[in-house]
Image: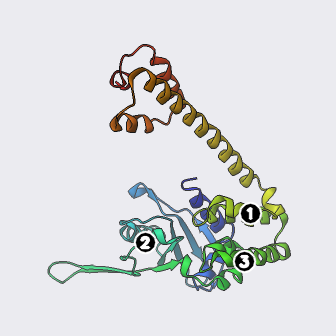
């Protein structure tokens, strides 16, 4: 599941770039297109970069965060400068925080420093969008490309069924079945940043388009596989502790902790087999 949200939001930006521009309060004077975000000169990659056309073209650089990153502002400044150097048009940067765990007191929207002698320095301004503080109405009434963010906005769990119903109405009226399936799958992934899986599945259970989404089905299958593997690991660990205790006595805290850290089912099975050929917990773990 780690970083799955990252692919989901990037995919939404690629499919609906103008909707993200609008959600940040910008009006496009020309066509909006996703451009290559690679800034390989520092072996890094900005999340998404949009070029806004018109008489005075400019670039919108987007960074998505679901966890705290103390180096974020410095990275954004670096990307901003590199993108300006590559494209030679003004660059505006914005960080979109998807949950409170990503917040940081240093994300003030401004970063600056001066040289020791006071004759040089840098002032960098950027936008910070904290999704959990965003009024849900602004997302529900916005473009389809940002609609999957609605459950992450300033809403309570009690309001979620109503929000999901409004999303259903919009997607039924304005989207094709294929696009709706894509947007519901993104909604499911993003809801995982804030809500337990059983709640999300209950809320979205009646969404036919999501059930037909290949992405959603792949997520469910991955979960089933992970569950089966986890069950086998627990079973082998239980066998190891049970048989080992019969032979060597109860393991001490250090030994038990070492065994708990083993999550490879094949290694645990091998350790169970070795119990007949070693004379102590210590020898087993060597």
Tell me the distance, in whole angstroms, between the alpha carbons under discs 3 and 2: 36 Å
- Measure how far apart labels 2 and 1 are at the Cα level: 42 Å
On the image, the x and y values in percent for residue 247 come to: 42, 20
Q: Nearer the viewer, mark 3 or mark 2?
A: 3
Name the residue rendered at 68%, 51% in the picture: 219
Q: Name the residue under label 1.
A: 202
Work out whether mark 2 precedes mark 1 in sequence or the reverse, and give the earlier one.
Answer: 2
Q: In this view, does 228 lie to the left or right of 253?
A: right
Is 262 rendered above or below residue 18? above
Q: Position of residue 140 (x, y in %)?
A: 70, 80
Tag 2, which secondary structure? helix
Q: Which of marks 1 and 3 is nearer the N terminus?
A: 3
Question: Which residue lies at the image location 40% right of the left edge and 67% below the top edge?
Answer: 72
Give 166 or 9, whichever is nearer the viewer.
166
User: Compared to 98, does 142 lie above or below?
Assistant: below
Residue 82 in percent (x, y) is at 41, 67
- The numbered mark at residue 80 is 2
Which of discs 1 and 3 lies nearer the camera? The answer is: 1
Q: Residues within 10 Å of mark 3 (few under 14, many from 20)?
A: some
The residue positioned 61% from the left and 67% from the top of the image is 34
In this view, the residue farthest toward the top is 277
> Cα distance, mark 1 to mark 3?
14 Å
For mark 1, does the 10 Å Cα neighbourhood hold few (<14), some (14 to 19), or many (20 or more) residues?
few
Q: Do the residues labelled 2 and 1 touch (CB within 8 Å)?
A: no
Q: Relative to 21, say whether 238 is above or below.
A: above
- Answer with mark 3 or mark 2, whichever residue precedes in sequence: 2
**At numbered mark 1, what does the secondary structure look like: helix, strand or loop?**
helix
Q: Residues within 10 Å of mark 2 (few under 14, many from 20)?
A: many
The circle drawn on residue 163 is 3
């Amino acid at each position: 599941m780690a970083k799955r949200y990252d692919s989901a939001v990037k995919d939404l930006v690629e499919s609906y770039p103008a909707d993200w521009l609008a959600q940040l309060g910008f009006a496009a004077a020309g066509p909006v297109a996703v451009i290559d975000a690679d800034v390989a000169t520092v072996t890094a990659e900005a999340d998404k970069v949009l070029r806004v056309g018109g008489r005075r073209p400019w670039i919108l650089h987007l960074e998505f965060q679901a966890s705290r990153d103390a180096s974020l502002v410095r990275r954004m400044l670096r990307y901003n400068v590199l993108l300006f150097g590559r494209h030679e048009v003004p660059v505006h940067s914005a960080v979109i925080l998807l949950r409170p765990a990503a917040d940081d007191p240093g994300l003030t929207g401004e970063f600056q420093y001066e040289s020791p002698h006071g004759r040089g320095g840098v002032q960098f301004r950027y936008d910070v969008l904290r999704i959990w503080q965003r009024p849900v109405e602004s997302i529900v009434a916005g473009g389809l490309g940002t609609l999957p963010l609605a459950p992450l906005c300033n809403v309570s769990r009690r309001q979620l069924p109503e929000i999901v119903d409004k999303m259903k109405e919009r997607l039924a009226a304005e989207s094709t079945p294929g696009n709706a399936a894509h947007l519901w799958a993104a909604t499911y992934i993003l809801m995982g940043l804030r809500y337990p899986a059983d709640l999300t599945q209950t809320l979205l259970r009646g969404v036919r388009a999501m059930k037909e989404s290949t992405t959603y089905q792949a997520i469910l299958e991955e979960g089933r596989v992970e569950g089966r593997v986890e069950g086998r690991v627990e079973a082998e660990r239980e066998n190891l502790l049970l048989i080992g205790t019969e032979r060597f006595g109860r393991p001490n805290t250090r030994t038990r902790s070492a065994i708990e850290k083993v999550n490879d089912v094949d290694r645990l099975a091998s350790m169970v087999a070795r119990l007949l050929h070693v004379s102590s917990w210590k020898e087993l773990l060597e």
